Image: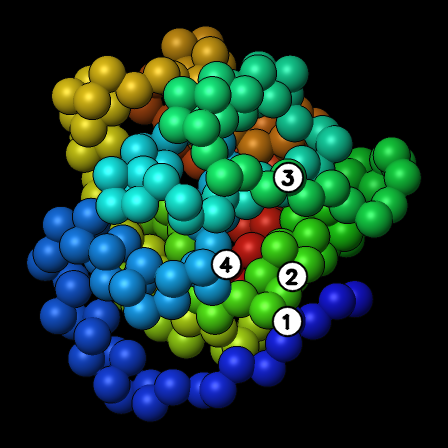
Amino acid sequence: MTTTEAVAVPDLAELAGISRQLEHQPATEVIRWAHEQFGDDLVLASSFQDCVLIDLAMRVSNDIEVVFLDTQYHFAETLWYVEQVRNRYDLNLRVLEPETHADDRWLDDPDGCCKFRKVEPLLRALEGKAAWMTGLRRSETAQRASAPIVSWDLGRSLVKVNPIATWSDLDITGYTQDRALPEHPLRDRGYASIGCWPCTRPVHDGEDPRAGRWAGLDKVECGLHD
Ligand code: SF4
């Protein structure tokens, strides 16, 4: 498996202090800080469930590299949406595919499937980079509830930036409406959280938005945010 190049470990106390300072700053200020710190060595990883983080980032700099992990099991609607967003922003988009053939691993080994189709391609995307930026939000799952704005990604040896960590679902909806952003076509078909088609179902009113991901399994994360 590919590994990211060694990046000098920063002063972790200093990084935690920066994170606290950015806690109450607008997301664009967090992105501006990251862009100023890391320049071309900053990558934005997007699942293209929506384009809120991309819109925020493009307001700071339209040359920030955006990475999409094409697992080969995305909904056709997701691939269509990627093209809509790519064209809207003239994105500096890099699409990573897994180094494996189509298989049925998701049926009996979803962790292994995510490892080959998400975790390993992300490592390739981050090779030689100093920082990555994600749309992770604290309100999404209990595991994400204490996610900092800025932290040291120990497993990948680079800085991780979560500019919208403090945002609620309502914040996302409000920003999407205010900015008239294009929405993923599955949103109005009950898909509150959108991943690969074998592992995603719509949710019912009142259900947890993430309940449609790996439904029926004891799995809530794909490994990207471990
Ligand atoms: S979400 Fe499902 S199909 Fe997609 S990589 Fe993970 S296990 Fe495989």
Q: Which residue is mark 3?
A: 95
Q: Is residue 222 visible?
A: yes
Q: What percent of the width, then of the height, locates residue 141?
A: 38, 48
Q: Which residue is mark 4?
A: 225
Task: Give the alpha-carbon distance from disc 2 to disc 4, as whole Å.
Answer: 12 Å
Q: Amino acid at mark 2?
A: Leu
Which one is closest to the eye, mark 4 or mark 1? 1
Left or right: residue 115 versus residue 94 is right
Q: Amino acid at mark 1?
A: Thr
Quick one: 147 or 127, which is closer to the camera?
A: 127
Task: Give the alpha-carbon distance from disc 3 to disc 1, as whole Å.
Answer: 17 Å
Badge 2, how many Cα within 10 Å: few under 14, some, many 20+? some
Q: Is residue 72 above or below residue 144?
A: above
Q: Which residue is mark 1?
A: 4
Q: Earlier in the sequence, mark 2 or mark 1?
A: 1
Snapshot colouring = rainbow
Q: Is residue 140 above or below residue 48?
A: below
Task: Tell me the element at label 3.
Answer: strand
Q: Residue at x 73, y 42 (%)?
A: 97
Task: Tell me the element at label 2.
Answer: helix
- State which quarter of the image contains the N terminus: bottom right
Q: Residue at x 47, y 70 (%)?
A: 130
Q: Earlier in the sequence, mark 3 or mark 2?
A: 3
Q: Which residue is mark 2?
A: 123
